Amino acid sequence: MIAPGSTIGILGGGQLGRMLALAAANMGYRVHVFAPEAELPAGDVAAQVTRAAYDDIAALDAFAAAVDVVTYEFENVPGATVERLAARVPVRPGARALDIAQDRLAEKTFIAGLGGTPASFRAVASEADLVSALAAIGTPAVLKTRRMGYDGKGQARIATPADAPAAWTAIGGAPAIVEAHIAFDHEFSVILACGGDGATVVYDVPDNAHVGGVLDTSRVPAPLAITRHAEAATALARRVADALDYVGVLTLEFFACPAGPVFNEMAPRVHNSGHWTIEGARVSQFENHIRAVCGLPLGPTTLTANTVTMTNLLGDAVHDWARLLADPSAHLHLYGKSEVKPGRKMGHVTRL
Ligand code: ATP
Ligand code: MG
């Protein structure tokens, strides 16, 4: 157990780290953020910050010596970084979860091996591969880089086989997968917290609406078209957690289809579709993640209201803050990012 008063190291410095750090501070922990970017929303609320590259060995060793446990808010931390840290200090969740979640091909293969159902997919390493994969899985389809995609970046939609060359160019000819386009009814996610002792808690599944590949709104309770799949989807998330000896919050995203839940992707971390849990659940995903990585008992996930809606403030929507503050049902969260860009996650608002 890592007792309150100890220092939690967080790899990554974005808004997820910021909300983790705030939850940790509430429980008497100190947080040390390690990230390379100049502007660090998490660093603004942390006791200590190391601003260094993920391959800066000296900085990593000093960080490992200064913290009692390491976790991450960003899953694209290089494997070698985690390996270096894990030889010196507990890293939770472990390196294997990170490894699998970094690569869409490894991730979907792993999920299929556990009995989950991803969209039909093929590995693509060249334009010729893409053409033959499309002949096998059909169109419409979605081409996605294997690594480093987020918020719909590194993806190209393919309506007909004739779109293949343009799609391959659009993703920069990087190693990719192509998958069938799913005509889903809804999207939802399973957010599971796993303690080190085998205990788990799970949140109500949110109904997630995306706009242009970016999460716009999460709502609970979700409609029956989603909740009827919650048991099967949660069972898959538990199998993932078991297979990885997982500790911390784990998120799986799904498409709700008439025949059952279709797996989209997993995140070995707290997730945007769980931001509503700060006010909308008895104990938030952030606090439960801190509890889990520190070996504390997990807290209840029960809803605090009949309905909870979280809306992202993307780009210019952040300028609405004064109007949002005037709404007594709205809880405003701003991430302190100085540059407003279209589609950038600047904050969110939760309504109970
Ligand atoms: P995020 O960081 O928001 O999770 P991402 O860049 O990792 O996004 P995905 O989750 O793969 O990308 O895709 C983003 C969104 O694009 C999905 O939530 C969904 O709305 C849509 N999408 C992705 N793949 C498919 C598909 N095969 N069929 C239909 N829609 C899809
Ligand atoms: Mg996604």
Image (spheres, rainbow, N blue to C red):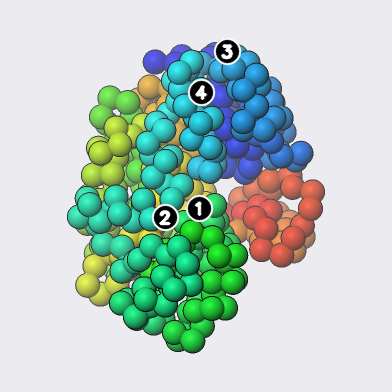
Spatial CA distance of label 3 from label 1 is 30 Å
Is the residue marked by circle 4 packed among few (<14), some (14-19), or many (20+) residues within 10 Å?
Answer: some
Q: Nearer the viewer, residue 98 or 106?
A: 106
Spatial CA distance of label 1 from label 4 is 21 Å
Which of label 4 and label 3 is nearer to you?
Answer: 4
Marks 1 and 4, the one that precedes in the sequence: 4
* Mark 3 residue type: Ala
Q: Which mark is residue 147?
A: 1
Tell me the residue that label 2 is attached to.
104
Answer whether labels 4 and 3 touch (C-beta < 8 Å).
no
* Mark 1 residue type: Arg
Q: Which SS class for mark 3?
A: helix
Q: Residue at x 72, y 33 (%)?
A: 44
Tell me the residue that label 4 is attached to.
84
Residue 192 lies left or right of residue 50; in this view the side is left
In the rendering, at what x and y percent does residue 115 appear? Answer: 20, 55
Q: Which SS class for mark 4?
A: helix
Q: Residue at x 49, y 79 (%)?
A: 164
Residue 59 lies left or right of residue 268; in this view the side is right
Q: Quadrant of residue 322?
A: bottom right
Q: Which SS class for mark 2?
A: helix
Spatial CA distance of label 4 from label 2 is 24 Å
- Any part of residue 209 in sight: no
Q: Residue at x 73, y 44 (%)?
A: 336
Answer whether labels 2 and 1 touch (C-beta < 8 Å).
yes
Tell me if the residue at label 2 has its CB under 8 Å from ligand 1. Answer: yes
Q: Which mark is residue 65?
A: 3
Q: Which SS class for mark 1?
A: loop
